Amino acid sequence: MSEHEHRVLVIGAAGLDLRVRPRSAAVEPGRSNPGDIRWGWGGVARNIAENLARLGTDVELITAVGDDWLGQALLARLHDLGIGTEGCLTVEGQPTSSYVALYDQGRDLQVAFDAMGIVAAITPGHLDRLRRLVREADIICIDANPSPGTLQTLFRLTEKYDVPVCADPTAALLASKLRPYLPAITAITPSRDEAEVLLETTLADDDEIRAGARGLVQAGVGLAAIMLGPEGLCYATSEESGRIAAFQADVVDPSGAGDALTAAVAYGLLEGVSPEEAVRLGMAAAAQTVICRENVCPSLSPEMLYELLVL
């Protein structure tokens, strides 16, 4: 029997993150330029899993890694964090997922590249063989990297076992894969551009963003929170809606803030708090993450989140 009160299953991508920032505004094409290069473990699902582990839940992660040193190191790190890896696949002959982001001298992303093809190894059959993990979970958190067939199998299983799902649409290019399953999603945390893809419309101003959150609920979502970065978020349920400002924070690195928000919203739902408080917990987690250089704040805890809420 687990010593943790809540069991969470997380499904999606895990890999290496590289972030590159030039030291000078004068970048010379075709040449090596001085820069600051940082690496860390990433992947939306992996980040969500680590956040939830730091919040004290019992976490299992279903992901795929390559049979390379990166995959071995990633699995070892998950073990060190107390994250279960029963559902993790090591795929022969394929590299572990990676993501490279190039920023300007500030914090604005200029261009990014990802290699996440190994996630396709999480097949419908693999997920079906792990149905016990689905059945035993109190909530399931997903990113949008798994294949359409795998997502179809997942939602068939969550319906069968009556398990709530919290979804992070991950990127605008991936968000449409979640559109058929909006009625089966308990909570969803899209960015503005991801919400536009889900709703197949443009959210041009604050009123339209608020209407967008309500539109996701009308499509069947239980709790929709559209993330707006430093401008906070708009959220809605069938009974309420609102706008929540971002917490004041001295931003060091915004990477991972959305993943922390998703994890903390799921944690709040597990704790039985109101939708508004769950979203505020998410905002607190995001604020704590942006003041850290890591994708997941090493000192994250429930006590820290609740302390931020009362400040």
Image (spheres, rainbow, N blue to C red):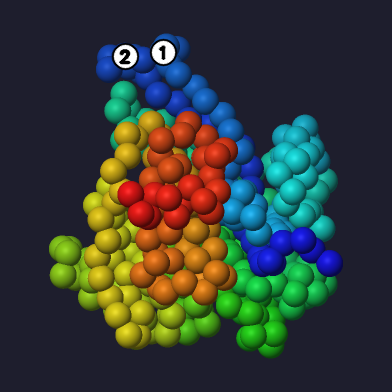
Callout 2 touching callout 1 (CB < 8 Å): yes
Quarter of the rendering containing residue 200: bottom left
Q: Position of residue 218 (x, y in %)?
A: 34, 85
Q: Which residue is mark 2?
A: 24
Q: Which residue is mark 1?
A: 33
Quadrant including the N terminus: bottom right
Instruction: Give the residue displayed 28% in from the left and 66% down from the top.
Output: 234
Looking at the picture, which amino acid does disc 1 mark?
Answer: Asn
79 w.r.t. 266: above or below: above
**Distance in Å between CA atoms under marks 2 and 1:** 8 Å
Residue closer to the observer: 221 or 33: 221
Instruction: Give the residue displayed 27% in from the left and 17% down from the top.
Output: 25
Instruction: Give the residue displayed 76% in from the left and 70% down from the top.
Output: 133
Q: Position of residue 268 (x, y in %)?
A: 50, 66
Residue closer to the observer: 145 or 50: 50
Residue 146 in view here: yes
Residue closer to the observer: 24 or 299: 299
Counting labels gives 2
Residue 66 in view here: no
Left or right of residue 92: residue 65? left
